[in-house]
């Protein structure tokens, strides 16, 4: 319950936001949240802190790291829209994740309906796997491609490097 100064205790903020008090204290340590005052050794927050915590949770749900959220909140307090480029990049990242999730969903749906006794024998499933391996959106794709290019020569020489396989 708010006190006469419009502040709420940490326990009340925890109840309103569904977070543990320890999570709120952690948000303080990483610079996302600051108590307005201390009374009787307890942290008290402004009533707008619940909205700030909700924003932090929303950003986390969208895939932002706590470091990114801190940068976003700091940028939001500046003049203009310095945060717009940051959000545009996050939007592209989210679109890519959604696209990958939709492809995965389609593949799982196919697997459930597939008439083949083994998914590995299914030409549609195999084509989807090959498409995934060739996808530039796949996490680590560039790293894998370099490893394959660099390792092809060695692999073709066999396990002992003597040219036999």
Image (cartoon, rainbow, N blue to C red):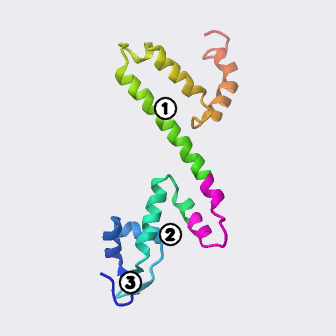
State the extent of the magenta-drawn residues as a range: 71-88
User: Looking at the image, is 74 positioned above or below residue 164?
Assistant: below
Q: CA distance from mark 2 to mark 1?
A: 35 Å
Quarter of the image for residue 79 reads: bottom right
* Left or right of 94 in this view: 47: left
Secondary structure type for disc 2: loop
Q: CA distance from mark 1 to mark 3?
A: 48 Å
Q: Residues within 10 Å of mark 2 (few under 14, many from 20)?
A: many
Sequence-first disc among 3 and 2: 3
Q: According to the image, label 3 marks what residue?
A: 7
Q: CA distance from mark 3 to mark 2?
A: 18 Å
**Closer to viewer: mark 1 or mark 3:** 1
Q: According to the image, label 1 marks what residue?
A: 103
Residue 32, label in figure: 2
Between residues 3 and 147, which one lies in front from this camera angle? 3
Q: Is residue 95 magenta?
A: no
Residue 145 appears at what percent x and percent y?
A: 65, 29
Q: Quadrant of the N terminus?
A: bottom left
């Amino acid at each position: 319950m708010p006190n006469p100064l419009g502040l709420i205790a940490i326990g009340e903020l925890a109840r309103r936001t569904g977070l543990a008090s320890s999570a709120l204290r952690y948000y303080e340590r990483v610079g996302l949240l600051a108590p307005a005052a201390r009374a009787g050794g307890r942290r008290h927050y402004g009533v707008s802190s619940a909205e700030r915590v909700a924003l932090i949770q929303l950003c986390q749900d969208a895939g932002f790291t706590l470091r990114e959220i801190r940068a976003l909140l700091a940028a939001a307090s500046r003049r203009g829209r310095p945060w717009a480029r940051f959000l545009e990049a996050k939007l592209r990242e989210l679109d890519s994740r959604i696209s990958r999730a939709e492809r995965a969903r389609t593949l799982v749906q196919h697997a459930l309906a597939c008439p083949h006794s083994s998914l590995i024998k299914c030409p549609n499933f195999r084509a989807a796997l090959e498409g995934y391996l060739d996808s530039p959106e796949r996490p680590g794709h560039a790293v894998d491609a370099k490893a394959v290019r660099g390792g092809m020569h060695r692999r073709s020489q066999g396990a002992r490097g003597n040219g036999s396989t």
